[in-house]
């Protein structure tokens, strides 16, 4: 080795020495705390799991080489007060992290302390969702938050289409936080917690009995139980005594019961008898070699130590928590950080206190340690160990169990990636995400009472209070709703009573009348009373409209209804000149002119070829007029022989057919139908006018016309009774009445059955129906809808309708109203086509005549002498003849057959003259 190499080696050794002196050597041990209740279902599993994890870490040369992990456990004794004291004692021992706490309540308290002391907490059992990273940055949850568990519960409730649940929970931070998350999750599924049964911590059997008794009085039969594992089993023994474990009930239990079942390897059979048919959630831990190896080691050690309690899910999470701390400390030390603690000046000022709070030290590297923990990414016995931005484990998932017989069976899984499924979440993570309703599936369940039929999930509440049913009492339309108290009657009441009888459970109800019977109550105000829990339901003629749907839930419509217009009509007395009324004056004039035009055209086309259209001028005029007007009755006796004449006649006969049919229909209508007094023919003409419009007070019609058609409120006149309807229509707009009334079809049917001088105008321009209103998500709405469908299918719904909507004889007149005169606007297209065809025929005719006239004149000129002296005279006479209009008219008046004969004769004469001239020339030359 030369001198240069020695210098380089010396410098490298010096640099390494300086780096080692500046960073310091790794400590021989690192202290980690553990905070849990030793004698508890979760604590017994976690204690051994934590000890095994520490042994495995210290035996692994790849993690914390040269440094021992020293565990300092503290027992919280199932007490929030003692747990807080033990946590503070733990902080005195210079711990770099704490595994725990087990309790969510202690987690809330101690998190405030570790925020100041910069000591990370890794809780394997505190599942309260309100332990958030934003408020407690040094709190890391190494188990699954109840936020995800309650979403799993909500998915199960939604899968079985239940809408209301009863939450039974322990009244502490853990229970209240979970139930709050459950309420939020159910709201996303359009379900809700209908009753909260809070059990005080450490309650005895009598208190639990009182709480469950009150819960059993409620309507929901879906019980969600979220309590502590050490006292929760007493709930089911009490429920068994209260007959709440029978058929018809649903019990969904959070993961605490799975921990109890997994830990109680030698549980008594009588305990299993209390929980038959329950649905239980358990944290999903994927199958792996590491998991099997840990279970085998845990069981061997537990057997050697005579530990009778079994391993549950929380033991797995406690084991991985130790490994997460060990890996983070290793990376912390490898980055050159030192484990140092410093005093808090604020605590030094409390030296006069006997609590010795000054012994609590701040971990100087706590923030860096926290960051290393949040970057954790390894595969433990619970699967991937990695944290999201809220300091929760990624990929939360649950097993869904069904307790039956002497154990439980797996019926499916839930994960926040794919929802409910029968395939393991680790398989679904490798597939495209699919959370649609059709993809959600669970295996069959054995429910309480050993039933395989899905429970309905609710019954009418056994509170002794009948259903409060609001009924509108109006001044009129007694056929729909009438009476007071228990003596209610009417079409709507009879439908409701018939539907209630079809329900599979008894529903006591009490009618509460709303309105004084002189003025109509506001229907939307009644719906608001239902939404505000002042009423349980509203029964009557309630239209299912948009603003009502936003407040309440309606049943299936039991009758179709839509808005129509009713207006006054009058009978028109026929006059002596009624036969002229079908057409307007303009229409009559154009029709007569067209008759004459067609007559002239046909005469022109037939005059030269048809002998029937020839004769004296008087006879020709009579023939032309007779032919034209006789086509109206298809009685013309003259035949057409020309092609153009026949073409024009065919088109004209079609036009005559249309005109006569329209005239007949219009005249019949005028002589038989009733006429509208106001000229209103439908909603468009009514809205475009400025006439006042009547509507039924209290109904939605006013809002509908104002919002959808922009009808000014000044035009809308409220009416309460049938008599007011008739009076307003009779008086009309000129005398303080209305031009028309807009109301729903059933009301108008009742009105018209009593007043025959009014009629419906136009078509029904909305489509809705009447239904019964209940509070949002009320199960009664769905059950009563099913009952209404049963009434419809059996025909009873129609029979009730016919009974109450029987029409009087005056309403049997279904003649139409509003017959109008026919004007040129309805026929101008037809007339235009006919006129154009006539003009076209005339044009072809005159072109043909001119061509014949030219040929005729040429043949005449050819037949005259061609002497040179006579040439100028002949040419002058020829020009004069061609230019004479009179000769052209005379030519047209001639029969076409005569013209052809003349032209043929002249052609023969021309040929003869030419032959004679040729013979004369030949003789002269000889």
Image (spheres, rainbow, N blue to C red):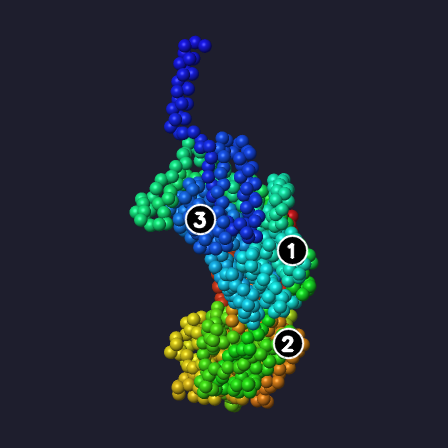
- Comparing 672 with 112, the one in front is 112
Q: Residue at x 49, y 66 (%)?
A: 884
Q: Say whether marks 3 and 1 touch (CB < 8 Å).
A: no
Q: Is residue 355 above or below residue 841?
A: above
- Identify the element where label 2 is drawn: loop
Q: Earlier in the sequence, mark 2 or mark 3?
A: 3
Using the rendered image of the protein, determine whether residue 254 is visible from the camera's viewpoint. yes
- Identify the element where label 3 is drawn: helix
- Identify the element where label 1 is drawn: loop
Which residue is disc 2 drawn over?
Answer: 502
The image shows residue 571 at horizontal and vertical percentages of 51, 88
Q: Residues within 10 Å of mark 3 (few under 14, many from 20)?
A: many
Which residue is disc 3 drawn over?
Answer: 87
Q: Earlier in the sequence, mark 2 or mark 1?
A: 1
Q: Residues within 10 Å of mark 1 (few under 14, many from 20)?
A: some
Res 830 quadrant in image: bottom right
User: Real-space Cα distance between discs 2 and 1?
Assistant: 45 Å
The image shows residue 523 at horizontal and vertical percentages of 47, 77
Q: Residue at x 56, y 44 (%)?
A: 49
* Label disc, if present, on residue 267 of the rendered structure: 1
């Amino acid at each position: 080795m030369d001198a240069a190499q020695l210098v380089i080696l010396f410098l490298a050794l010096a640099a390494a020495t300086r780096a080692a002196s500046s960073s310091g050597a790794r400590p021989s041990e690192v202290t980690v705390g553990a905070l849990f209740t030793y004698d508890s279902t979760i604590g017994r599993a976690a204690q051994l799991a934590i000890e095994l994890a520490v042994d495995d870490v210290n035996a692994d040369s790849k993690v914390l080489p040269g440094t021992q992990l020293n565990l300092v456990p503290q027992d919280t004794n199932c007490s929030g007060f003692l747990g807080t004291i033990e946590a503070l004692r733990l902080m005195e021992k210079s711990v770099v992290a704490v595994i725990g706490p087990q309790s969510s309540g202690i987690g809330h308290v101690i998190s405030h302390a570790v925020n100041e002391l910069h000591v990370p907490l890794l809780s394997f059992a505190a599942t309260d969702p309100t332990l958030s990273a934003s408020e407690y940055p040094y709190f890391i949850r190494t188990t699954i938050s109840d936020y995800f568990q309650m979403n799993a519960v909500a998915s199960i409730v939604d899968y079985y289409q239940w809408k209301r649940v009863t939450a039974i929970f322990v009244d502490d931070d853990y229970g209240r936080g979970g139930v709050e998350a459950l309420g939020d999750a159910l709201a996303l599924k359009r379900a809700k917690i209908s009753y909260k049964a809070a059990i005080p911590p450490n309650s005895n059997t009598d208190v639990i009995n009182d709480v469950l008794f009150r819960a059993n009085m409620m309507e929901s039969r879906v019980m969600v139980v979220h309590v502590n594992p050490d006292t929760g089993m007493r709930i089911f023994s009490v429920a068994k005594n209260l007959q709440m474990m029978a058929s018809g009930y649903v019990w969904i239990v959070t993961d605490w019961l799975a921990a109890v079942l997994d830990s109680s390897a030698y549980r008594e059979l009588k305990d299993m008898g209390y929980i038959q048919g329950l649905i239980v959630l358990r944290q999903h831990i994927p199958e792996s070699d590491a998991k099997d190896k840990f279970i085998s080691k845990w069981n061997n050690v537990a057997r050697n130590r005579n530990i009778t309690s079994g391993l549950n899910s929380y033991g797995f999470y406690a084991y991985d928590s130790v490994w997460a701390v060990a890996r983070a400390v290793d990376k912390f030390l490898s980055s050159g950080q030192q484990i140092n603690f410093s005093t808090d000046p604020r605590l030094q000022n409390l030296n006069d206190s006997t609590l010795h709070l000054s012994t609590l030290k701040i971990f100087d590297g706590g923030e860096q340690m926290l960051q290393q923990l949040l970057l954790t990414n390894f595969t433990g016995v619970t699967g991937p160990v990695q944290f999201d931005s809220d300091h929760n484990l990624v990929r939360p998932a649950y097993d869904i169990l069904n307790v039956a017989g002497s154990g439980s069976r797996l019926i499916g899984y839930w994960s926040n990636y794919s929802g409910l499924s029968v395939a393991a979440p680790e398989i679904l993570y490798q597939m495209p995400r699919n959370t649609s309703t059709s993809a959600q599936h669970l295996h069959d369940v054995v429910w309480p009472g050993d039933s395989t039929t899905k429970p309905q999930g609710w019954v009418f509440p056994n509170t002794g209070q009948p259903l409060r049913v609001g009924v509108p009492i109006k001044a009129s339309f007694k056929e729909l709703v009438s009476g007071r108290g228990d003596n209610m009657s009417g079409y709507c009441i009879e439908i409701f009573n018939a539907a209630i009888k079809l329900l599979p459970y008894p529903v006591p109800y009490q009618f509460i009348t709303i309105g004084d019977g002189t003025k109509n109550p506001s229907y939307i105000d009644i719906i608001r009373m239902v939404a505000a829990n002042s009423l349980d339901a509203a029964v009557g003629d309630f239209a299912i409209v948009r603003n009502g749907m936003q407040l309440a839930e309606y049943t299936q419509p039991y009758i179709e209804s839509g808005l129509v217009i009713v207006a006054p009509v009058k009978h028109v007395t026929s006059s002596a000149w009624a036969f002229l009324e079908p057409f307007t004056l303009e229409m009559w004039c154009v029709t007569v002119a067209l008759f004459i035009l067609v007559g002239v055209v046909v005469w022109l086309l037939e005059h030269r070829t048809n002998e029937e259209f020839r004769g004296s001028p008087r006879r020709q005029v009579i023939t032309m007029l007779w032919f034209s007007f006789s086509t109206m009755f298809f009685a013309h006796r003259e035949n057409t022989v020309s092609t153009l004449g026949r073409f024009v006649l065919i088109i004209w006969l079609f036009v005559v057919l249309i005109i006569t049919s329209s005239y007949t229909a219009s005249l019949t209508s005028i002589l038989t139908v009733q006429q509208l007094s106001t000229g209103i023919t439908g909603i468009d003409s009514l809205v475009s006018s400025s006439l006042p419009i009547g509507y039924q007070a209290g109904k939605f019609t006013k809002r509908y016309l104002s919002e959808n058609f922009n009808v000014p409120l000044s035009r809308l006149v409220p009416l309460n009774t049938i008599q007011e309807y008739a009076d307003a229509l009779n008086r009309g707009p000129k005398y303080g009445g209305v031009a028309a009334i807009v109301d729903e079809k059933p009301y108008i049917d009742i009105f018209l059955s009593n007043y025959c001088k009014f009629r419906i105008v136009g078509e029904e321009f909305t489509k809705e129906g009447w239904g019964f209103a209940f509070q949002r998500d009320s199960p009664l709405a769905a059950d009563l809808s099913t009952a209404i469908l049963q009434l419809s299918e059996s025909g009873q719904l129609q029979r009730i309708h016919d009974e109450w909507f029987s029409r009087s004889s005056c309403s049997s007149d279904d003649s139409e109203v509003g017959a109008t005169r026919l004007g040129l606007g309805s026929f101008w297209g037809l007339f235009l086509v006919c006129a154009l065809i006539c003009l076209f025929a005339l044009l072809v005719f005159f072109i043909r005549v001119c061509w014949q006239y030219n040929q005729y004149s040429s043949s005449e000129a050819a037949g005259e002498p061609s002497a040179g002296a006579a040439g100028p005279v002949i040419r002058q006479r020829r020009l004069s003849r061609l230019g004479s209009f009179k000769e052209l008219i005379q030519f047209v008046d001639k029969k076409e057959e005569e013209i052809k004969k003349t032209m043929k004769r002249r052609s023969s004469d021309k040929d003869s003259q030419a032959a004679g001239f040729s013979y004369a020339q030949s003789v002269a030359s000889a």
